[in-house]
Amino acid sequence: MIYSKCTECGSSNLKRDSDRGEIVCQNCGLVIEENLVQEGPEWRAFDAEQRASRARTGAPLKYMSPNKGLVTEIDQYNRDVRGGKIAPSQQAQLYRMRKWHKRASISNSVERNLAIALTELNRVASHLGLSESIREAAALLYRKCVERGLIRGRQIESVVSAVIYAICRQFGIPRTLDEIAAVAEIPKKEIGRTYRLITQELELKVPLTNPRFYITRFVTALRLSGQTQEKSVELLDQAIEKGLISGRGPMGVAAAAVYIASVLTGERRTQKEVADVAGVTEVTIRNRYRELKKALGLKVSI
């Protein structure tokens, strides 16, 4: 319980005595609480190495591991404490122990599901170049889906792909449904359907995709200069102010902005080159190009 005032005199001049484990009123001397638990460490550390060696809390939870990293494992090295090689007879015994330990660690359907799903999640995330923190966030979201029963009757791969897409949207990482579908080898419609279900059932607040997230990727892939990138962002900002991106795909708008900027800065790229990099059709780029040109009053010729 947290005290802000003395229960006897109403004074707020309270002192916490760590040595005695008491909270005392400095005005009337009343001991408000005693036998307090000291939550801090009883040891001192003067550098990072000492702090790490004396800490007793262990490693943080890893949601990418089916058992969250809380279960011990028998390693594959077949060596004793001193580093010496173990006798062949003992190696056979260790092999049997290792096999049964692995079987015992996956004892029910939920654990089997997590073992398969997290392996698939790690594979897809590796192909997409996602960081460890993004993988952990995706694994945590998948566990929430398991708790709510959202995986029942659905492909593990489609739920994993939808979870990755949702986390990428939340963290502002430019990964499209097409990219995830290509890596996961799952139809785009199936991932989209599962994604909508997850966001509705878990009430996720997923922000709208900002086309600016894709500018750097397109500019780098097309080998354009920083000047072109700045011009692309400037055109996009003007389009956002005029509400031109509402109801339109962010990839198409970003691709059109990069195309126009490349023409304006003299680093012209063809519509086909931009379309191949952005993963949209040339028709989409032309339509967005005409809309931007008309709304922003640009003098650009194809």
Image (tube, rainbow, N blue to C red):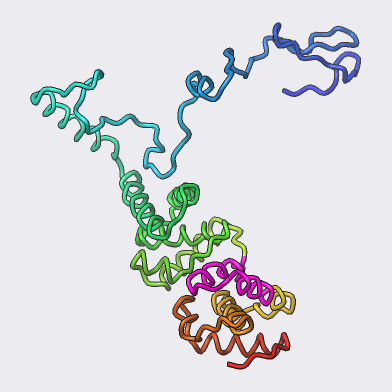
Q: Is residue 210 magenta?
A: yes
Query: In the image, what residue occupies the spot 66% across and 85% down?
Result: 292
Q: Is residue 53 left or right of residue 8?
A: left
Query: In the image, what residue occupies the spot 37% across and 52% down?
Result: 122
Q: Quadrant of the C terminus?
A: bottom right
- Quarter of the image where one finds residue 41: top right
Residue span colored magenta: 208-236
**Residue 163 location (% of width, % of height):** 46, 58
Q: Is residue 230 magenta?
A: yes
**Residue 82 location (% of width, % of height):** 24, 18
- Quarter of the image where one finds residue 27: top right
Query: In the image, what residue occupies the spot 20% across and 25% down?
Result: 79
**In this rendering, is residue 296 above or below 251?**
below
Q: Main secondary structure of the magenta part?
A: helix
Q: Is residue 205 left or right of residue 115?
A: right
Query: In the image, what residue occupies the spot 43% across and 53% down?
Result: 149
- Nearest the viewer among 124 and 297 is 297
**In this rendering, is residue 199 above or below 58?**
below
**Residue 26 location (% of width, % of height):** 87, 11
- Nearest the viewer among 276 and 150 is 276
Q: Is residue 231 left or right of residue 268?
A: right
